[in-house]
Amino acid sequence: RLHHHHHPIATFSYESNLLLPRFIPSFNSSFFSSQGSHLLDKSNRKSYNMRLALASVWLLYASSASSFATTASHPQNQLLQQRRNGGFASDTLSHPIGFSAGVNPAFLTSTRGGGSKDTSLQASVDTETAKASSPILPENMSLLSQRGRQAVENLIAFDGDEGAQAHVYGNWPEPGVEDEGKQQLAEQLADLDESYPGGLAAYLTKAQRLLKESADGVNPFADFEAKVPEGESLTFFDEESSTMSFEEAEQIGLKAIGDGVVFVLVAGGLGERLGYSGIKLSLETNLCTSKSYLELYTSYIKAMQFLARQKSGNNDIRIPLVIMTSGDTDPLTKQLLEDNDYFGMDRDMVTIVMQDKVAALKDGKAGLAIDDDNRWEVQTKPHGHGDVHHLLYREGLVDKWEAQGLQHVVFLQDTNALVINSIVPALGVSSARGFHMNSICIPRLAEEAAGAITKLEHKTDPSKSLVINVEYNQLDPLLKAQGTGDVPDETTGFSPFPGNANNLVMSLPEYAKTLRGEDQGVVLEFVNPKYKDEKARTDFKKPTRLECMMQDIPKLFQKELSEPKVGFCMFDRWFTFSPAKNALEAGQQTIAKGGSAPGTLSSAESDMYIQNQRKLEFAGFEIKGEDKPIMMAGIPVTSGPHVMLCPSLSISQEELKEKINKDSDLTVTRRSSLVLEGHHLKIDGLSLDGALVIRTGDDTHVTVKDLKVQNKGWTYTDLPEDDDSIPEHIRIRGYTMTKHETAEYLLYEPGHFVIESDGQVTKVE
């Protein structure tokens, strides 16, 4: 098969059942690649029926009361009492752990889980009273749509005498002046009302409570002690383990694949922090294959599906993928999928759910933050990846998966490619230990700026104890209060608390039951304001908002399950964790200060090569030459070899052992580059000094027999600084790869082939 690249390849022609390779000179093509993107319309959201909408409103508001309870002295409760005395209907909902809050249906206009605009529950506000006291002229109100007018009236009624929102609805100019702006603001308020579970009133009520706790310096861990939770520590080389070996965990995990698994990819952010204006999923994970993060994840899912079918004999096994986007990433993510034909996945197996932004808050009273340049626009900010749980519930996906008999849900972050190494053994640990939630973790240094999985034991009520992530700035004070502090273990040198890599494995039955609870997957929120004056703690340096994190769902497990089992599975950092999250300049500063984890795209790529080098050595390869990192654009990266063992070659130790004959002659030099891709590709002897690429089809069986390759290979090339003509996705690395000469075998014809020692390819009958 002739496959033409702009870099040297081996081309083949059939002659007496032989494929004879020849080399063609070339130039580097990676530099000139481009990434286009086009906007798509937002997908229509599903609508639930009125009964579910009504139930959602009441249950979600009850949930907000449970998480952020108000007291009788709180201004909101006083306001509720005033409205009750004024003739408004109001009920009190009691929470199982003792909190209660007044709930007024006048303030519950809709819920994100309650359906579309057609089915959302309309407020039962006494609109005549609201209109009578409204600071907005009736002529201005008449300019608004029904939903916009309702949203404004509800905000005025909710604000009452506090005046925290008066800057939003007060001092509107007379009719005829900036009318379009008034309509824009009203429609945005309606959108914010409909997009948040329980409505804008629920959001502001939670915000007031949390901001008050923040200003008062409330310690959420005052009643808890930190203990090390139960879990497993596995190493790829089985140098040490806890109750099970890596191989045992992997074997159980391989069976779990066949029992049914689904992947959820959290991808709501752009690559601005990386110095990239597009979506992070479109970035190239490495320069050897140029595969994007999304292509890598989909290729892993396809490889897992292929292996599950092969092991079970059931060709009906299909693995779903859900991608959570945001308004920023949604159209670009859809375009990336369309442009690449969904990277070979069945289109009906890929679902996109989009999260909404939430209103920004300007002060300790939870006043809505208005845009500095547009008086008629409320600032909005991302709510956090904790939205993913409610979105899966809202879209009916967990019910669908449970009906299909799936057993596990795996949550992934967008730019940590190494996590695919740990998924199979983590599934095995979850199955063997019966974990309802299993956090994939890494060893954590004491006082490292990373969250830790911690068992919080309640001092007086064991039913309130739970295992959950605790952020580093909270863990150290908690441990100091216990008399120790965040100190290393004397034996390992690491903190005894495993570091949170924020990749999760859920047991679907318990996860689905939890999402069907009163909170409907809405995890507890937090607020993190930056105060202008730390003593006064009222005004902010910049607007804040409520945030939520997907790893906080154990709080919902605690409420909905009688005995939640939450644990962890820890792997070596080189094996499972090297995210791309920082721009080149930030990474250079980290290195200059003596840091070892710059978190750049280049360091993430280098770590991919390093973990594949170690896999090659595990499989029997000898890497010739000294391992000396080289500096590229101010970041230390591996000198090589640059190795990409694609998911179709192996997703497990077992496959790696099957594909590479440890007893054969296996050598590779440091300057080499190697790409191996194919379900039925086997290496039975290889000596490489240069660049070699072998790709095979799903029904193509290829054996490499004592192949010897020597050529000019591939090298890194520094890029000039501040050259805007260089494509952005190349520039952010600071260098590119020049592919001087390559031996490339592209074999897709069904059948059996052997690549001999001299490079000839023979088709075996």
Image (cartoon, rainbow, N blue to C red):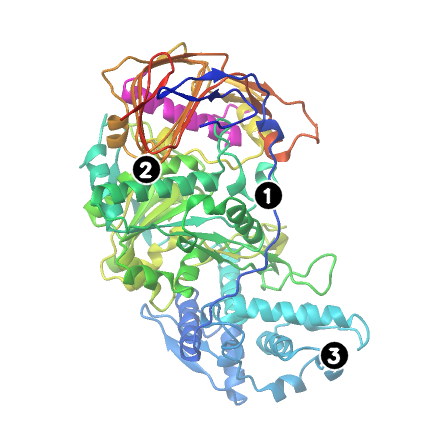
Q: Earlier in the sequence, mark 2 or mark 1?
A: 1
For label 1, the SS is loop
Residue identifier under label 3 = 140
Q: CA distance from mark 2 to mark 1?
A: 28 Å
In this picture, is 579 found above or below 256? above
Residue 157 place in picture, x, y as percent: 59, 78
- The percent coordinates of residue 598 (x first, y second) are 51, 29
* Circle 2 residue: 422
On the rendered structure, is 697 left or right of 128?
Answer: left
Rendering coords of residue 246 (x, y %): 23, 33
**Residue 413 percent across, percent down from the top left:** 44, 44
Query: Which residue: 29% across, 43% down?
Result: 568
**Label 2 – label 3 distance at C-alpha:** 59 Å
Upstream in sequence: badge 1 or badge 3: 3
Q: Amino acid at mark 1?
A: Gly
| Image: magenta residue range | 593-622
> Does the rendering let one see residue 491?
no
Dots 2 and 3: beta carbons under 8 Å? no
Q: Is residue 621 magenta?
A: yes
Q: Please say if 16 is above or below 508.
A: above
Whether the residues at callouts 2 and 1 have beta carbons within 8 Å, the answer is: no
Q: Main secondary structure of the magenta part?
A: helix
Residue on which the image places disc 1: 278
